[in-house]
Image: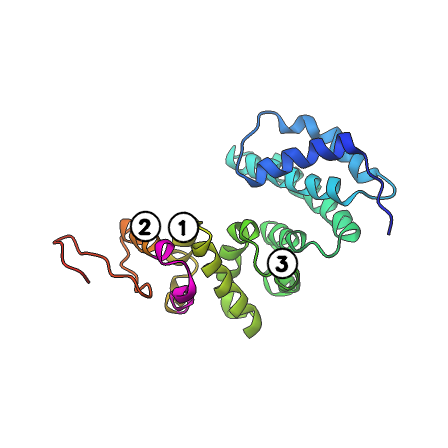
C-alpha cells in the first residue's frame, strides 16, 4: 500500500490530535472540518492524517455532549464513524482505532456483545499502551464478564499498567467504578508494579473513601496506627 504524504496538513492535524490525547483544550475545532474532509478524500490515503481526523472528530463529539447539544453530538459521532471506517481500511493495524470503533458503536447505542470483536482486536494490536488504557480500560471493565479469558487477563494487566505509569486518578476511578465487582482480581495484579505508585494509589483510593487491600502497602489509620 502506498501513502501520499502532505507534510503541512499532516503535521498540523497530527499536532492537534497529539495535544487532544494529552487533554489539551481548543476553541473552534470546527474550523478544522474542511481539512478533515480533504484528508478523507485523499487518494491514496494518508494514515496519519486519517488517524488525526478520527481523534479530532471524537473530541468534537465529546464537546457537543458536554454542551448538552444532542443534535450536534449525533452529527459529530456519525462523522467520526464514517471517518473511522476509512481510517481502519487505511491503517488496519492501529489498535487505538479498533477501540474507537467499539467506543463509537457503544455511544450510538449498540449492544456490547456484537462489538466485542473490535475491542478484542484493539487488545491484540495494542495490549499495553498507557495512553490508550486511559480510555479503554473503563469500557472493558464494564463488559468484563462478557470477555474471553485471555481478554480478561489483558484488561487486568492494563489496569496495573495505569497504576505503574502513574495514571493514578484514572486507576482509582476505574476500580471504584466499573471495576468494583472484580476489585480483588485487579488489586492482585498490582504486585509487580512500582511500590511508590502502589502506595500513592492506595492513598488516593482512601481519600475517596475506600481502604483497598493493595499488595505490599500498609497505610496508617486516622488514629496513626498502621493497618
Magenta part mainly helix, strand or loop?
Answer: helix
Residue in the foreground of this view, choosing between 196 and 122: 196
Q: Position of residue 81 (x, y in %)?
A: 70, 46
Q: Quadrant of residue 11?
A: top right
- Which stretch is magenta? 185-198
Which disc number belongs to residue 168?
Answer: 1
Q: Is 75 positioned to the left or the right of 171 in the image?
A: right
Pick whichever of labels 1 and 2 is earlier in the sequence.
Answer: 1
As for residue 187 lying within the magenta part, the answer is yes
For the residues labelled 3 and 2, the Cα–Cα distance comes to 28 Å
Tell me if I can see residue 148 in this picture.
Answer: no
Q: Are marks 3 and 1 in contact (CB under 8 Å)?
A: no
Query: Local crowd at mark 2 within 10 Å, few (<14), some, or many (≥20)?
Result: some
* Quarter of the image where the C terminus is located: bottom left
Q: Is 175 positioned to the left or the right of 155 in the image?
A: left
Q: Position of residue 117 (x, y in %)?
A: 66, 64
For the residues labelled 1 and 2, the Cα–Cα distance comes to 8 Å
Which disc number belongs to residue 126?
Answer: 3
Residue at (48%, 58%) from the top-left corner? 161
Q: Position of residue 12 (x, y in %)?
A: 70, 31
Pick whichever of labels 3 and 1 is earlier in the sequence.
Answer: 3
The residue tagged 2 is 204
Amino acid at each position: 500500500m502506498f501513502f501520499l504524504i502532505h507534510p503541512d496538513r499532516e503535521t498540523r492535524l497530527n499536532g492537534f490530535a497529539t495535544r487532544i490525547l494529552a487533554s489539551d483544550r481548543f476553541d473552534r475545532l470546527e474550523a478544522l472540518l474542511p481539512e478533515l474532509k480533504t484528508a478523507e478524500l485523499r487518494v491514496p490515503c494518508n494514515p496519519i492524517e486519517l488517524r488525526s481526523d478520527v481523534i479530532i472528530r471524537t473530541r468534537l463529539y465529546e464537546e457537543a455532549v458536554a454542551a448538552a447539544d444532542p443534535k450536534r453530538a449525533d452529527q459529530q459521532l456519525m462523522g467520526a464513524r464514517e471517518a473511522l471506517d476509512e481510517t481502519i481500511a487505511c491503517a488496519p493495524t492501529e489498535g487505538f482505532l479498533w477501540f474507537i470503533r467499539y467506543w463509537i458503536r457503544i455511544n450510538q447505542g449498540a449492544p456490547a456483545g456484537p462489538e466485542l470483536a473490535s475491542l478484542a482486536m484493539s487488545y491484540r494490536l495494542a495490549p499495553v499502551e498507557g495512553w490508550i488504557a486511559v480510555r479503554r480500560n473503563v469500557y472493558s471493565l464494564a463488559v468484563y464478564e462478557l470477555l474471553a479469558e485471555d481478554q480478561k487477563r489483558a484488561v487486568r494487566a492494563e489496569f496495573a499498567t495505569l497504576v505503574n505509569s502513574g495514571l493514578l486518578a484514572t486507576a482509582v476511578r476505574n476500580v471504584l467504578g466499573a471495576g468494583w465487582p472484580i476489585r480483588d482480581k485487579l488489586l492482585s495484579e498490582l504486585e509487580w508494579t512500582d511500590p511508590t505508585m502502589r502506595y500513592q494509589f492506595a492513598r488516593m483510593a482512601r481519600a475517596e473513601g475506600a481502604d483497598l487491600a493493595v499488595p505490599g502497602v500498609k497505610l496508617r489509620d486516622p488514629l496513626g496506627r498502621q493497618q
